[in-house]
Amino acid sequence: MVRLDRLVNVLGGYGVRLACCPVSRSVELRSVAMREDAGDVGGDVFLAIGAESVGQAVAWAAGASAVLVHGGVEAEREAAVVGAAAGIAVLVVDPAVSWSQLAGVVYGLVLEGRETESGRGPTDLFALADSLADAVGGAVTIEDRSSRVLAYSRSQQRADAARSETILGRRAPERLRALFDARGVTAHLAASTEPLFVDRAAEHGLTGRMVVAVRAGREVLGSVWVTCGEPLTGAHRTALTDGARTVALHLLRSRASADLERQVESDLVIRLLEGTADAATVVSRLGLPPGPLRVIALRPHEERHAALLLAFERATTGFGWSRPGRSALSGTTLYTVLPGEDVAAAREWVAALHAELAVWAGIGGSASAAELPACRQEADECLALHEARDPASPPPAYDESWDDILLQRLRAAARTGRTPARGPVAELRRHDREHGTQYAATLRAWLEAQGDLAEAGDLLGIHQNTVRYRLRKMSEVTTLDLADPRKRLGMIIDLAATGEL
């Protein structure tokens, strides 16, 4: 099951436009249908394959909540009238997107909703790679558009050192990517659906490759590589081309499943961070172990919007229960709920993400499920600390940085004008500005030294008699009352709130 709003949002990435929506976008979709020779088949989502017009598609889809039909601008205009009259949402599909590709996404979202929510992973690409290797007569590697390995065949026919290095590193080495760029392979994959032969390069351990792009309409999803010493021809070449289409369908289904997983996960994580009465139940639904948890707040260094989405993708890669944390985006921040008390483990998780994408991070204190809203605030404040520090410094954790957090809160209050305009500290600063004295700094040093004149003098780089003299002169400017512990505490807080301590 999926709601219409979710279906529209996901399909928008595949060239599908919502042209008319007379029904609620929160309506639940539980079935998919298409026209068959034996007659119409009812379903919540209708794929109008073969419809010659929007009117015909809507007529076929009687009783459905939404219908998908191929078309352009004219179809959208027709849909606005016909769909509204029939009470059916009309989604117009870019003609460049094939029905086989689109069906995979729709079926994955609508029919696999319950399965993905309970943790079912994407379709096994490794089995597909094995099948394709048998069909083309060579070892197969399936990669995403960033040259990361998604799957590979067990077959080692004509395997070479370059393939082994790519699989072990889980990505094509940089020198190979540079070679493919120089030979025009990358440009070919971006522009063509035809297979391309890449000649051997002994210095790179490459015996030869046949490669074809994996596409969904105009979008390149990845590529399929076959080790071979010469170009594939005949049935082998056809098998590779057909195999790439099958891989595209699998990747689209996996993406749709992943999109739904992310939505379910994000909703649950946000519930925990905002506070919910059934926090322990939500933690269990997320597949997190019972026990202490931590919240990690992250922001990328640069290109905030694109980088934030990339960070979210990296944090949520590998669906199911193999990932240690569960993540959600909120505003400009990525939050991850991580199990365990160990700060080092949290920092290791951040370091693994930082290796792919430069991020600022803050780590909240150890908390129970019910305490996660407070832990989120701690993580936010630790994140603000990290953003003010050296980017190379380790992300602050609340356990170790609570004092800095307290001072940060005091300074935030001071910036809003919530500090006394009068009083000992304010009057000493005013005197310093008007007469060029160092009275506020002297008071700070004396307080830090807990009244030890010699230590205060060392902090200021002056003799202790000079400190004694300044204190006497300061008492002529304002009432210090240094013998009163409450007054001393008040001056310490005033100095700290305004950045002087």
Image (tube, rainbow, N blue to C red):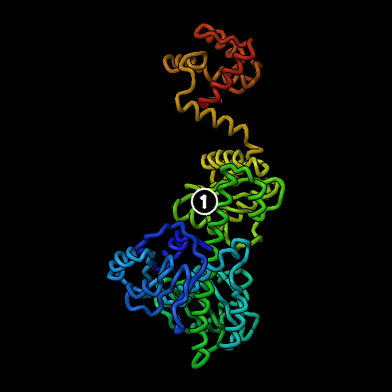
In-front residue for pair 93/492: 93
- Secondary structure beneath dot 1 equals strand
Q: Residue at x 32, y 75 (%)?
A: 53
Q: Residue furthest bottom?
A: 234
In-front residue for pair 480/341: 341
The x and y percentages for residue 5 are: 45, 59
In-front residue for pair 373/212: 373
Residue 148 shows up from this direction: yes
Mark 1, other Cα within 10 Å: few <14 / some 14–19 / many ≥20: many
Quarter of the image for residue 49 reads bottom left
Q: Residue furthest right?
A: 291
Quarter of the image for residue 463 reads top right
Q: Residue at x 51, y 28 (%)?
A: 411
Assign the N terminus to one quadrant of the image: bottom right
Judge from the rendering whether residue 184 lies leftward or rightward of residue 258; answer left or right: left
Q: Residue at x 57, y 71 (%)?
A: 149
Q: Is residue 357 above or below residue 422?
A: below
Assign the C terminus to one quadrant of the image: top right
Q: Is residue 49 above or below residue 365?
A: below
**Callout 1 amino acid:** Leu
Q: Is residue 248 above or below residue 450?
A: below
Q: Residue at x 47, y 72 (%)?
A: 42
Q: Residue furthest top?
A: 476
Q: Is residue 37 above or below residue 26?
A: below
The x and y percentages for residue 444 are: 57, 20
Residue 175 shows up from this direction: no
Residue behind mark 1:
329
The x and y percentages for residue 438 are: 50, 18
